[in-house]
């Protein structure tokens, strides 16, 4: 059980690094990674000019548990929205646009991305 939890953490961190690199290559600035709140976490926050993107990263090693994007439940979407609204309320983001995106990654056994998909604006305000 403890090993399984550790493997999920390592897998999650690997996926988040791949997502961070992807956004940096597209010209985005990383504002925060693993932004912690008392009721949740935002995996990645990136910015380009006056746009903020809050990124949820889901990573799987095999298709055994379904596609990564299938794990975004109503409860998870609600939690993400609550976290984003809290983050926005804590700063001066007047004039900024924002959206919540999903990066879904399937890795092979060596940690190489077999599939990398970026889904934009997955949760409407």
Image: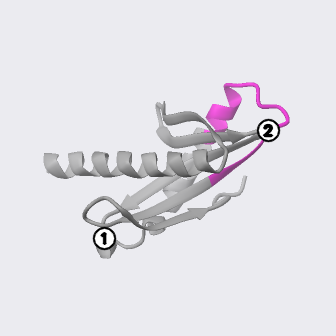
Location of residue 121 (image quadrant): bottom right
Density class for disc 1 (Cα within 10 Å; few <14, some 14-19, many ≥20) is some
Question: Residue 118: x and y, percent?
Answer: 58, 62
Residue toward you, 15 or 26: 26
**Disc 2 element:** loop
Residue 72 in view (yes/no): no
Q: Residue most toward the right?
A: 95
Say the numbered circle drawn on residue 50. Answer: 2
Figure disc tally: 2
Do the CB atoms of the residues marked 1 and 2 lie less than 8 Å apart?
no
* Residue at (68, 39) in percent of width and height: 47
User: Is-magenta flag for residue 98?
Assistant: yes
Q: Is residue 34 left or right of residue 5?
A: right
Density class for disc 2 (Cα within 10 Å; few <14, some 14-19, many ≥20) is few
Stretch in magenta:
84-100
Q: Look at mark 1 in the image and give the residue it sits on.
A: 62
Say the numbered circle drawn on residue 98. Answer: none
* Residue at (35, 61) in percent of width and height: 112
| Image coloring type | one colour
Figure check: 79 above or below 91: below
* Residue at (25, 64) in percent of width and height: 109
Location of residue 59 (image quadrant): bottom left
Chain-order first, disc 1 or disc 2:
2
Figure check: 76 above or below 40: below
User: Is-magenta flag for residue 34?
Assistant: no
Question: Residue 27: x and y, percent?
Answer: 67, 45
**Disc 1 element:** loop
Residue toward you, 63 or 29: 29
Spatial distance from mark 1 to mark 2, Cα to Cα?
37 Å
Figure check: 4 above or below 115: above
Residue 4 in view (yes/no): yes
């Amino acid at each position: 059980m403890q090993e399984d939890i550790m493997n999920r953490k390592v897998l999650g961190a690997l996926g988040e690094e791949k997502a961070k690199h992807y956004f940096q290559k597209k010209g985005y600035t990383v504002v925060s990674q693993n932004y912690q709140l008392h009721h949740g976490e935002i995996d990645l926050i990136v910015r380009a000019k006056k746009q903020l993107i809050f990124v949820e990263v889901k990573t799987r090693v095999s298709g055994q548990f379904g596609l990564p994007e299938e794990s975004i439940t109503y409860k998870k979407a609600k939690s993400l929205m609550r976290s984003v609204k809290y983050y926005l309320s804590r700063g001066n983001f007047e004039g900024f646009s924002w959206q919540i995106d999903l990066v879904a990654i399937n890795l092979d056994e060596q940690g190489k991305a077999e599939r990398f998909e970026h889904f934009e604006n997955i949760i409407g305000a």
